[in-house]
Structure formats: C-alpha cells, structure tokens
C-alpha cells in the first residue's frame, strides 16, 4: 500500500496545477496568518466555499496549504511585534520579540521557518509511514485520560508564572473563570451572563488574545513613545540567517519540538498552542543555561514553532483514518473532504488511494514552498521593526480589531478585544503575566469537561482515575513533577531562579 | 513580490466569488445572507453552503453563508428575528434553533414560533451505535441491559436538548425507564460523542451518518438501528428502530430556512418555490448525499404545523409544564 501510494501521489502533487494550488494556499495562508487574530480556522472558513468550485484534490491542497501558511504567518508578528498572530504563537513572543529588540529578528524568523519546515517534513514522513497504524490512539484517549493529560499540562502553567508564583496562578485562575462564562458547552446551562445575549456566547479566545497582546502592546508602545521597535542597522537577508552554534541549537530544539508536538498532536483536543507551551517548557528545563530563556534564546523560538506545526500535522492522522477532527481548523478540512464526496476512514487509503497520497505529498510540497518563500522574505519582514511606530501602530490596531471580529462575525467581540486591551495594558503596568491567563483560558474548559465526563462515566466515583492506567500514569507524573518543583525550589537556588526568571517579558 | 501576491489572491478570489450578475426583478435583487448558528465545519454549515450555492445558481443572485456560532444558537436566531423583514437576512434553521430551543434556554428573548418558515430541504436521522467490542448485537439486547440496570447504563448526551437526547429520551420512554435514573455522559458535539462511543467509554451512543460513517467503516463502531421511518441510503443493511421492535423512536433532524416574523407573502412563496426547485438540482443532491443529508422538501406552508407538533413532543419528553 505504502509503496504503491506515496511516489504516485508525489508525482500527482507535482503537476503544475497542484503546485499552483499549494503556492496560492501558502501565500494566502501566510498573509492571513500574519494578521493578528486571523488564524488558520478563520482563513479556511472564509475560503471553504471555494471547495465547491475547485476539483477535490485542489480544494484539499489549497486548504492544507492555507493551514500551514497561517500557522507560519502567526509567528511572524509574534516575533516582530510581540503580537501572536494566533494562539499557537503566544509562547513564541517570549524569546522571539526579545530577539527582535536585539536586532536578531532575521535569525528568529529564519529559525521559525526552519523549525516549521523540519516539523512539516517529519510530520509528513510519519503520516506516510505510521499513519493508519496509530490512528487508534485517538480512540484510546477517553475523558479520564484527558483529565490526566490536562492536569499534567497545568504544571506548565505554574512554571510560566513569571516573577511571582502567586500572580501567575491568579492569572491562570482568572483565565479559567473567563472561559467558563456563557453557555456551558456540555449542558447548555447559562453561567454568569447577567442577562446579556452577547455574554451567552461567552468570550471567544481570539478577541481575548488579540486584546491582551495586540491592543495592549499598541497602547503601551504609544504611551512609552517608542519611535521604532529596533533602532540599529539590519544587514542583507542572508546575513540574518542563523549559523554555527546558534543554528545547531535551533535545529536540535526543532527536532525535539517536532517529536513531542507530533506525538501529542495525534490526540484529539490537543491544541497546537498547548504543545508549543509544553515544548518551550521542556527546552527550558533541559537547557544548561536556562537563564537565556526570555532574553532571546533561539531554542525558545525553534521548539514551540516546530511543536505547533508538528501538532498540526499529527492531527491529520485521526482526521484521515477515522474522520475525527482534532481542532476547529481540521473540522473545516473534514467538511471540505465530505463536500467532495471523500469519506475519511481506512478506505480512504484504499478507494481514494491516489487522492489521499496526493494530499499527503502536497503537504510535503507546501512545507517546502513555505520555506523557500519565507527565507528570502525574512529580510523584508525584519525591516518592519524599523518602520516608525506612529505608522505601524494604527495599522496593527485596525488589523487586530478586524481579527477579533472575524471568527464569529460579531461586534461584541470587537468591544471585547478593546476591553481586554485596557486590561492587558494595566496588567503589563502591574507586571501581571498574560501567558498564564491564556493558558488557563485554554485548559480550564478542557479540565472541567474531562473531569465531568469521567465522573459521569464512573457514576460519580473517583476510582476511575486509578483504574485507567494511562490516566493514573499522567496524574502520578503530575504529582511527582509538582513535588520535584517544590522540593528544588526550596533546596536549589538555580531551579528557583529558573522558575522566577521565566518570562518577565510577557 | 507583492505584486505577485496580489495577483494570486485575485486569482483565488475570482474562483471563490462567482457570477455577481444582478437580475432585474423585485426579489431577490441584492445579496442574501444565510446566518448559520453553528461553526463552519458542522452539518448545518455544510448544508447551508451547498444550498446557498444552488440558490445562487437558481436566482443568479449572490447568497452568502455567515457562521455566527455560540450561545446555543440564541444570539444568531435573535439577530435574524430582529433583522429587517425583507427576506435578505435568513436563518439556517434546525430543531436545535426551533422546536428544541426553549427546553434548553427557558428565558428566550423571543417567541420560538414567531418566525416565518420558508421551507425545509433535507434531514438526517440519528443512528444508534455501539463500540465494535460491545456485547450488544441488536438494539433489543442494549435495551435489555438498560432495563436490568438503568443506573449503570451510560449513553451519549449533548447536554440540554439535541437530536441525541431527543432520541434517547424517546427510547427510554418507550420501554418505561426514567431518564433521570440512567447515566448520561455529556459532550460538546456529535463528533466527540461518537468518538467517545467508539473508544468504549459509553454503552450506547447515537450520531448522524456523517459522524459515524468513518468509524463504522474503520471497524470501530457497530450500527444497531437507524431512528427513522426508512432505512438510511448510506447504511442499507442497518434496520430501522421500528424493524428492531421500537416503533416511534424516531427523529428527523431537519434543515430548513426561516426568516423574521412578518415576511411578505411574495418573499415566502419565492423561497418555497426556489427551495423546491433546487432539491431537483443534481449537484445539490450529490453534495447532500456526500455529507449524509437526505433530501426532504416541505413547502413553507407545511412547516409551521410540523414544528409545532415537534415542539409538543419535545415538551412532553422533557416534561416541561
């Protein structure tokens, strides 16, 4: 099956038309992804109607290319302006923006492209080789397993707390509270909507993100009267590419990020944003010089960028072999497949073998296109850090508000973004970190849902977490990690420093 | 470089935005917006897009599909109900935003039936499924287990009121089991509920054809019965609930178009005729088949009675006074 499929698929994907679709998709995706708030799912939703007009392979290739392009584009503004284009790039802002202020925007952008490329290639090869075989993993993960995994991920929240553990945890809880407003996703019950129809929808992640990071950043920069982000000189684009020791560090971090991001990406519900956080946390923990993190460590850009892309790739396995979408963007992809009469499932590799392998091969091509498109553009993008802020600022603000409006086509979300802009501004002034708030916003609903579902399954008995070995393993690991952190925090100055110095930037 | 960017965007947009020729007639003479109260990937969104495309061709007039998800469909429905009653802002309607809505949100800011029904197009039934390693081979065996020990009988709920809960409540009622004694496991959406069933986390699950078909063909799910009067074209071997010995346990999760109250008669009849015409469009039929929807046309005039009686069944099942 494998031998027949992949090479033929590659040949089919390399036709001029399909290459054109990949190129157009990458360009569109990158452009949309660069705009704060407009992430992969907005871009794909806008272009879903085209799935009806293009031939089946064409529409899937365009959508997949938009998906990768938007993921990549999202990190560009994270690095250049401290504004994550989409939530998966939040963690990239920490070291990415530090590098930009240091005049190393080119290096950060280049390693982000290289990291995404490595993850894309690694992910494609893994899908082609082991794809259908590991699809069952998505089914083996039931609510108790998710509860274990999310609890374990919460440890990352603790270590992202910045200078004060108390402030970090408070922000994390605030994020969870905000995410719980509105309609309870499981029962439809209304929570704290204060009689408002708009609040019934709850807060969407995008306007909160765009407000806390994008709008707040513009307010802050304007108030501090910063003329431009970087005032030094930038060389030609090839001189901005990382080399030597820096390149080696970035590459190994990319490989580690790819591995962890891909394995986690096979699980439904595993968001690229979360694996990016976990990959960043891992890099900082295993680094011999953790104090560089937050001050422009190249691993802090490479690992999360590789991880979020690998997660995006990993999601294709349950999608193609089981029809299980692991993210909103992949749900749209599933819709496009179905509209075209392509029913995901193991039969996909039999009945629609050529088309399936064409699509997989086109992922490879789309990733290559992205790299070769973006490396020469690194110089152009990096020059944005030289644009006077009185021109750049208003543009960013306008784009942020469009981005907030787009996912739900709602004016309420625009006001939300402005409101969170003010909150974000106040938080930065008071040195309250925003990253734990976003993490809490992401993890809170997952934690609540998996706990409630687990307890429904067991009829209210906590024993379910001890009986299911994977869930128990995660919970045990979470306890151990927590104990270790507490132990070392009291015993070792170095680890204490590690926790404290994490991300004063955010 | 930028010039080339703009050119390629233009090329793709040219594909995405087809013939914007405006015909000279009273209605429709400008773009129509169909508001979908769910996110883009779901079956309501996909059906709306397919129907929108067919209508665009039929009328030679732009039809836009806009997703406004969240809040149990209430914000989107409210927006359509408050729109100018001119027929240019309409709702992609379904039981979730009509007959079942009041059970979930008792304090609605509008009267559910105070809307103009414009015509029904398609439906999809709920299908009872079990994990492939389940001991149940028939719906009867599952019901035997349910009657023996309701309190450990776990099933997939979509929380408040949805097609899943409606079908399960009908089943429980028909065999005399109180739903409050069973063990519902709630999830956010149909796809998640079906995945949970395939993973063996619940004893009996239900889902639409589009959600179950991939896992069924992968051998992770076994279909017990289709909760519809007729067999599903995608599953010719699966018995109906009536054939399995449970007549009346049926739901047709319909897709229709509705508008604000007080739409002019010409607009209502134009829509009803157009929807009837497009249900003969082979392209639309093919797309509907691909996403598991079964054509099910009912004219605007018939819809109010259908929804009213469905609403009565819902209120009875949920014991609303």
Image: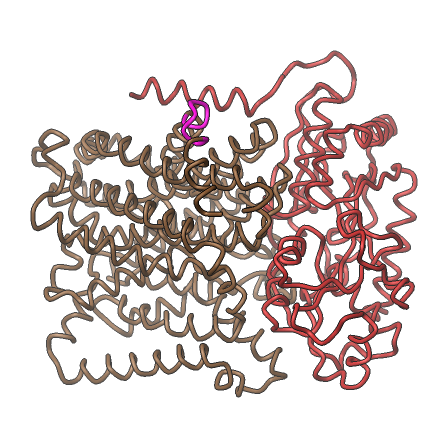
Chain colours: A brown, B red
In the image, residue B58 sits, relative to residue A111, either above or below, namely above
In the image, residue B176 sits, relative to residue A344, either above or below, namely below
User: What main secondary structure does the magenta stretch of the protein show?
Assistant: helix
Location of residue B290 by image quarter: top right
Question: At x 18% / y 41%, what residue is drawn?
Answer: A225
Q: Is residue B106 visible?
A: no
User: Where in the figure is residue B307, as x and y percent of width and height?
Assistant: 86, 50
Question: At x 54% / y 47%, what residue is drawn?
Answer: A349
User: Where in the figure is residue A111, as x and y percent of width and height?
Assistant: 21, 45
A131 displayed left or right of A121: right
Pick the residue in front: A310 or B45.
A310
Question: At x 63% / y 53%, what residue is drawn?
Answer: B214
- Magenta extent: A12-19
Location of residue B262 by image quarter: top right
Image quadrant containing the N terminus of chain B: top left
A361 displayed left or right of B259: left
Report if residue A18 lies within the magenta region.
yes
User: Where in the figure is residue B83, as x and y percent of width and height?
Assistant: 70, 37
Location of residue B219 by image quarter: bottom right
């Amino acid at each position: 099956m494998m031998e027949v499929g992949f090479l033929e698929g590659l040949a089919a994907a390399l036709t001029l038309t399909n290459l054109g679709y990949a190129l157009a998709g990458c360009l569109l995706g990158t452009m949309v992804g660069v705009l704060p708030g407009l992430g992969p799912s907005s871009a794909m939703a806008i272009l879903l109607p085209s799935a009806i007009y293009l031939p089946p392979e064409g529409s899937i290739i365009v959508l997949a290319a938009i998906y990768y392009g938007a993921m990549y584009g999202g990190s560009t503004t994270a690095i250049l302006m401290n504004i994550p284009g989409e939530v998966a790039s939040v963690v990239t802002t920490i070291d990415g923006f530090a590098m930009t202020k240091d005049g190393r925007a080119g290096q950060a952008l280049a390693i982000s492209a290289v990291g995404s490329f490595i993850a894309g290639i690694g992910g494609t090869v893994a899908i082609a080789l082991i794809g259908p075989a590991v699809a069952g993993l998505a089914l083996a993960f039931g609510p108790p397993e998710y509860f274990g995994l999310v609890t374990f991920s919460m440890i990352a929240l603790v270590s992202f707390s910045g200078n004060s553990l108390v402030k970090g945890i408070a922000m994390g809880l605030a994020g969870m509270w905000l995410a719980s407003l509105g309609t309870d996703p499981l029962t439809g019950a209304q929570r704290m909507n204060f009689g408002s129809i708009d609040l019934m929808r709850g807060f969407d992640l995008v306007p909160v993100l765009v407000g806390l990071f994008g709008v707040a950043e513009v307010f802050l920069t304007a108030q501090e009267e910063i003329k431009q982000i970087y005032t030094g000189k930038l060389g030609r684009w090839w001189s901005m590419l990382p080399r030597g020791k820096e390149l080696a560090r970035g590459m190994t971090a990319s490989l580690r990020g790819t591995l962890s991001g891909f394995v986690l990406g096979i699980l439904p519900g595993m968001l690229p944003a979360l694996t990016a956080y976990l990959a960043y946390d891992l890099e900082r923990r295993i680094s011999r010089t953790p104090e560089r993190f937050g001050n422009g460590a190249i691993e802090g850009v490479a690992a999360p960028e590789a991880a979020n892309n690998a997660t995006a790739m990993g999601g294709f396995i349950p999608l193609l072999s089981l029809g299980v979408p692991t993210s909103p963007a992949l749900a749209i992809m599933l819709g496009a497949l179905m509209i075209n009469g392509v029913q995901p499932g193991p039969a996909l590799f039999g009945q629609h073998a050529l088309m399936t392998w064409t699509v997989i091969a086109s992922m490879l091509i789309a990733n290559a296109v992205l790299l070769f498109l973006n490396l020469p553009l690194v110089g152009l993008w990096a020059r944005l850090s030289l644009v006077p802020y009185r021109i750049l600022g208003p543009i960013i603000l306008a784009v942020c508000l469009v981005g907030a409006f787009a996912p739900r086509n709602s004016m309420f979300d625009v006001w939300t973004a402005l409101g969170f802009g003010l909150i974000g501004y106040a938080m930065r002034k008071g040195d309250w970190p925003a990253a734990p708030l976003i993490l809490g916003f992401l993890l809170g609903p997952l934690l609540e849902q998996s706990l409630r579902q687990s307890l429904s399954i067991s009829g209210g008995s906590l024993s379910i977490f001890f009986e299911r070995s994977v869930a128990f393993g995660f919970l045990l690991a979470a306890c151990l990690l927590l104990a270790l952190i507490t132990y070392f925090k009291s015993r070792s100055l170095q680890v204490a420093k590690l926790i404290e110095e994490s991300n004063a930037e955010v | 470089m930028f010039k080339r960017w703009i050119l390629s965007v233009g090329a793709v947009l040219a594909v995405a935005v087809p013939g914007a020729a405006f015909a000279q007639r009273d209605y429709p003479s400008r773009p129509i917006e169909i508001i979908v109260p769910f996110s883009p990937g779901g079956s309501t969104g996909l059906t709306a897009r397919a129907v929108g495309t067919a209508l665009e061709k039929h009328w030679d007039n732009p039809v836009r599909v806009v997703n406004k998800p969240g809040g149990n469909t209430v914000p989107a429905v409210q927006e359509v109900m408050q729109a100018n009653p001119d027929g240019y802002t309409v709702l992609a309607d379904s039981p979730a935003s009509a007959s079942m809505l009041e059970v979930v949100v008792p304090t609605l800011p509008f009267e559910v039936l105070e809307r103009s029904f414009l015509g029904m197009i398609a439906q999809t039934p709920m299908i009872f499924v079990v994990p492939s390693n389940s001991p149940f081979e028939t719906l009867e065996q599952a019901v035997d287990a349910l009657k023996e020990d309701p309190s450990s009988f776990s099933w997939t709920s979509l929380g408040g009121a949805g097609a899943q809960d409606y079908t399960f409540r009908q089943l429980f009622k028909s065999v005399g089991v109180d739903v409050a004694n069973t063990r519902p496991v709630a999830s956010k959406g149909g796809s998640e509920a079906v995945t949970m069933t395939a993973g063996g986390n619940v004893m009996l699950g239900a889902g639409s054809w589009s959600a179950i078909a991939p896992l069924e063909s992968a051998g992770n799910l076994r279909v017990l019965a289709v909760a519809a009067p007729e067999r599903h074209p995608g599953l010719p071997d699966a018995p109906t609930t009536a054939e399995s010995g449970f007549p009346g346990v049926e739901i047709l999760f319909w897709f229709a178009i509705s508008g604000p109250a007080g739409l002019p008669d010409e607009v209502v009849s134009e829509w009803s005729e157009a929807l009837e015409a497009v249900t003969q469009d082979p392209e639309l039929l093919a797309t509907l088949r691909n996403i598991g929807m079964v054509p099910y046309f009912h004219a605007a005039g018939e819809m109010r009675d259908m929804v009213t009686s469905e609403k009565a069944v819902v209120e009875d099942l949920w014991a609303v006074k």
